Amino acid sequence: MTESAAPSRTGASRKRALDDLALLGGDRAFHPPVSTSNLTRPDPERLLGYARRVHDARRLTGDGPLGAELEARLRTFHECEHVVTFSCGFWALALAVRCLALPGRTEVLMPSLTYRRMADAVAWTGLIPRFCEIDPVTLAMTRATAAAAVTDETALILGAQPIVNCCDMSGLEALAADTGLPLLIDSVESTYESHEGRRIGNFGRAELFSMHASKLVNGMEGGYVTTNEGELAQRLRRLRSHGADADGEISELGLNARLSEVHAAFALANLDGLEACVAHNEAIYRAYRRALGDLPGLRLLAFDESERCSFKNIVVELRDSWPLSRELTIAHLNGEGVLARAYYHPPLHARPTSYETRGRELPVSDALGERFLLLPCGANTGPGDVADVVELLRFLSDNGATLADGAGR
Ligand SMILES: *Cc1c(COP(=O)(O)O)cnc(C)c1O
């Protein structure tokens, strides 16, 4: 390898000839690589301040004062009545499904083009995922696509936010009201957003959020559920602690899924910097908008600025005029240290699983699943990187026909 260890971005990102591309023997453009994850780090002094409180409180298990403070901060943030934190979003999701699914029914209705572990969380509850289609404009399930997949066995509607903007939550709420089915929404990708002026965290029976390092509110690991139902919140608290009541009596089967105080400290320190993080994301988004304006093969998914938005994810559609396959585009970008990824690929209905799933004929999800790409964003990407990424995309576009023919490969 002749790769230089020096962190030089400009220079190597200027490709002049095809063999300047890393896949064709040239130097990698991005050292270190730029990724599609948020990866916000808190201010170190603030982090240490919270960590000292964990230390001084001598509360070394979960369910302590910082966890309680975090839940209170998140209640204010979402303008909702109850927040219950968990060790991760995955178990928060599984436990919320367990609480809300109607007894005696077997299916949980959900979109297929979504978070790759969503069906797994449902399978852990013993229920069967049933997939529905999505709307080609919002990339999310709608009242109509969900209604088409309701059966006599539907126990729960599990909505999921797309990664830019929100799904039609009022429509899903209306469907839930019409059918008498409970509605739970995975709102991980809409943490900061509002919908029709209402703050996310107040829709359906409950909503789910993650505090994984890649998400907007980073606790390194962690998750939470918002709800305006006191009894549901209480049951979730029980389930995250082995199913034990306040007096320690085990009343039902639970998990050990409490958030630790150290993770709560990390999340609190990041919450202190949340507005700065969103401002950074907005600057990145605007830089992409400017730079992609004259690259017609790519369409940037626009945030709906009539609502609150986090500007967190940068998603582009590869139009028919884009000369390379998505696979080859990603291969070249990844080769250069641009960790672009396919949007939720493959869709859940197309993945092999060890458990049963239903609803396997989803032509719209199949087609949309091939068209979108996530570009770098988050704390480790700067506006200058955006210009370099787009310049690289332009080079790939200009040389697309030759590259698609397999030049130099
Ligand atoms: C990350 C994620 C989760 C689960 O979160 P973890 O905290 O990583 O378990 C759930 N839903 C969506 C949409 C996610 O992106």
Image (cartoon, helix red, strand yellow):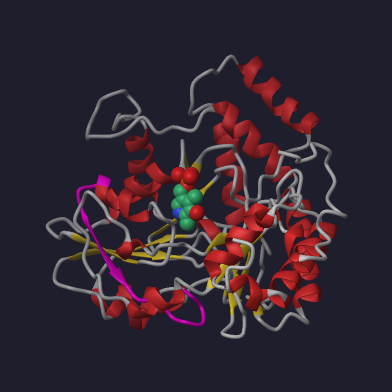
The residue located at (49%, 60%) in the rendering is 187
Q: Which one is in front, 336 or 175? A: 336
The residue located at (81%, 75%) in the rendering is 290
Instruction: Estimate the x, y position of residue 241 in percent, counting from the top left.
Output: 36, 30
In reply to whether residue 22 is colored magenta, the answer given is no
The residue located at (63%, 54%) in the rendering is 334
Name the image quarter holding residue 13.
bottom right
Q: Which one is in front, 165 or 234? A: 165
Instruction: Estimate the x, y position of residue 179 in percent, counting from the top left.
Output: 24, 75
Q: Which one is in front, 327 or 294? A: 327
Is residue 269 among what the camera can see? yes
For residue 311, above or below residue 197: above
The residue located at (60%, 66%) in the rendering is 329
In reply to whether residue 134 is colored magenta, the answer given is yes
Does residue 368 appear left or right of residue 156 in this picture? right
Name the image quarter holding residue 58.
top right
Q: Main secondary structure of the magenta part?
A: loop
For residue 236, above or below residue 262: below
**Quadrant housing the N terminus:** top right
For residue 402, above or below residue 2: below
Task: List the single residue furthest toward the front.
Answer: 408
Instruction: Estimate the x, y position of residue 216 in percent, counting from the top left.
Output: 63, 51
Q: Which residues are magenta?
A: 124-139
Q: Which one is in front, 155 or 163? A: 163
Instruction: Estimate the x, y position of residue 274 in percent, counting from the top left.
Output: 72, 50
The mark tally for this picture is: 0
